[in-house]
Image (cartoon, rainbow, N blue to C red):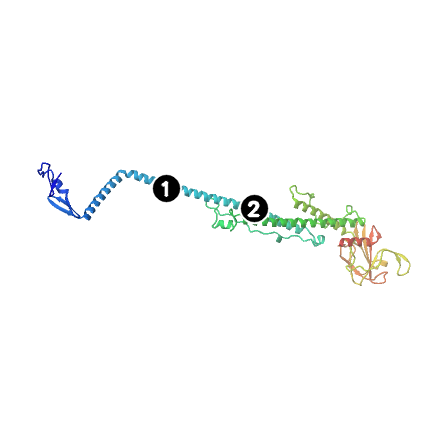
Amino acid sequence: MPHRSGVYYHQSGQYDAAYYAPLQQATPVHQSGTDYTFLHAGRQLRVKPIAFWAMAATLIGMAAWTLTTASYFAFREDVLTRLIARQTDMQFGYEDRIADLRAHVDRMSSRQLLDQEQYEQKLEQLLRRQAMLESRAATISALPDPAVTGSTKQPSRSDTPRMAPIKPLPLNDKGAAVAPPNRSARLWPTGAGTHGGGNIDALLAGVQASLDRVEARHAAALKLVEEDYGAKVRRMHSVLTELGVDPNKIGVRPAPPAIGGPFVPARLPADGGSFDRQIYRVSVARAQVDRLAQTLSNVPVRKPVMSELDLSSGFGVRIDPFIRAPAMHTGLDFRGDTGDPVRVTANGTVTAAGWSGGYGRMVEVDHGNGFGTRYGHLSSIDVRVGQSLKLGQIVGRLGTTGRSTGPHLHYETRVDGEAVDPQRFLRAGSRLAK
């Protein structure tokens, strides 16, 4: 459609103002240089390019905003639904991860608690064994008698390693065990490996080995005690046999009063272990030693004087020192100093105490089972008739009373009233002393 000077025409060349009036108001007539010209109500409006494009951008932005706003209101419910669903999925994902982590922590805590319970059980077993060994040490220390076992050394309580008791875990309000702070650092030492139990296992193994050594020392000590008691029993049997005494038939003097009780045979416990069997054997051997020692305490096998025996005349036929004729010497003469103590050589009862002819001042003691002893030429007597004597008790003082040429002790040993050589009994006593 041609135009001239900004005026629109039909093809017939006639101007139609009514038809083209709106076009004249909004349509640019032409562009002069860089400006844009618009016709409005017969007027021209010239617009710079910057302003033109700014208005265009504004119109485009408003249109886009309008479309966006319309779309939001049209699809708001769907968008919100998707956002809520996405948020819910994210929340569930986080909750699942938290639950997994919590389960992992619970598993680790349960495993650590289980491991600690196992270690505590091991420690409890070691503590029980330690207490048992301490009880055994006390039992062993009560067994030996220095007079019987000599220098046998027994393990003491200090030989047993000690361990600190394990404190129980604290409990929460529901009664469940709660791991204390820094528990893993206490339970698993540094450098203990993946599971952290290497050092504790080594420590427990060391304690176990130490307890094994203590138990071995206990067994060795009991073996020494048992062997020592056995040697004593054999030696006592040998001595009694040498003296012609049957230890199973010889009687023992009545024990002091206020002793008794029902007879309960000694038996090994049905569930007794090696230690119990050793204790049983040692106890039986010790009972035998006690019985034989009590028997020997009534047999005159000890020396009548504490110093070294200085024999001046033996048992048997000799030349009488006064009439110079052969005579039977019924005892042994021991030289000594006047006033030296004379001791009884076995338990017994005084049957005579006073002057007795050639014996001078003399003490006679009945030891039971047919055994008796005499102590002559005493300067003084320290006992009386009917008095009970214990082995080693002083009966008088050495002197030269009666038929004597100088201070000495005339010592006799009698069996069923007949004088026998005291040397047999003294030699037996020397064997026992060794």
The answer to whether any part of residue 212 appears in the image is yes
- Note whether 384 is above or below 72 in the view shown: below
**SS class, disc 2:** helix
Q: Residue at x 40, y 42 (%)?
A: 95
Give 330 or 355, whichever is nearer the viewer: 330
For label 2, count other residues whose C-alpha is less than 10 Å away and answer few (under 14), some (14-19) or many (20+): some
Q: How many marks?
A: 2
- Quarter of the N terminus within the rendering: top left
Q: What label does residue 90 carry, if any? A: 1
- Quarter of the C terminus within the rendering: bottom right
Residue farthest to the top, as pictured:
12
Residue farthest to the left, as pictured:
14
Relative placement, left or right, of 194 versus 423 is left
Relative placement, left or right, of 72 versus 377 is left
For label 1, count other residues whose C-alpha is less than 10 Å away and answer few (under 14), some (14-19) or many (20+): few
Give 59 or 319, whichever is nearer the viewer: 59
The answer to whether any part of residue 365 appears in the image is no
The amino acid at mark 1 is: Met
Place of residue 357 in the rendered image (x, y in percent of width and height, measured from the top left)? 86, 58
Place of residue 128 in the rendered image (x, y in percent of width and height, measured from the top left)? 59, 47
For label 2, the residue is 122
Tell me which label, 2 or 1, sits earlier in the chain.
Answer: 1
Q: Quadrant of residue 269?
A: top right
Distance Cα–Cα, label 2 vs label 1: 48 Å
Place of residue 53 in the rendered image (x, y in percent of width and height, measured from the top left)? 20, 46
Relative placement, left or right, of 39 versus 317 is left
The amino acid at mark 2 is: Lys
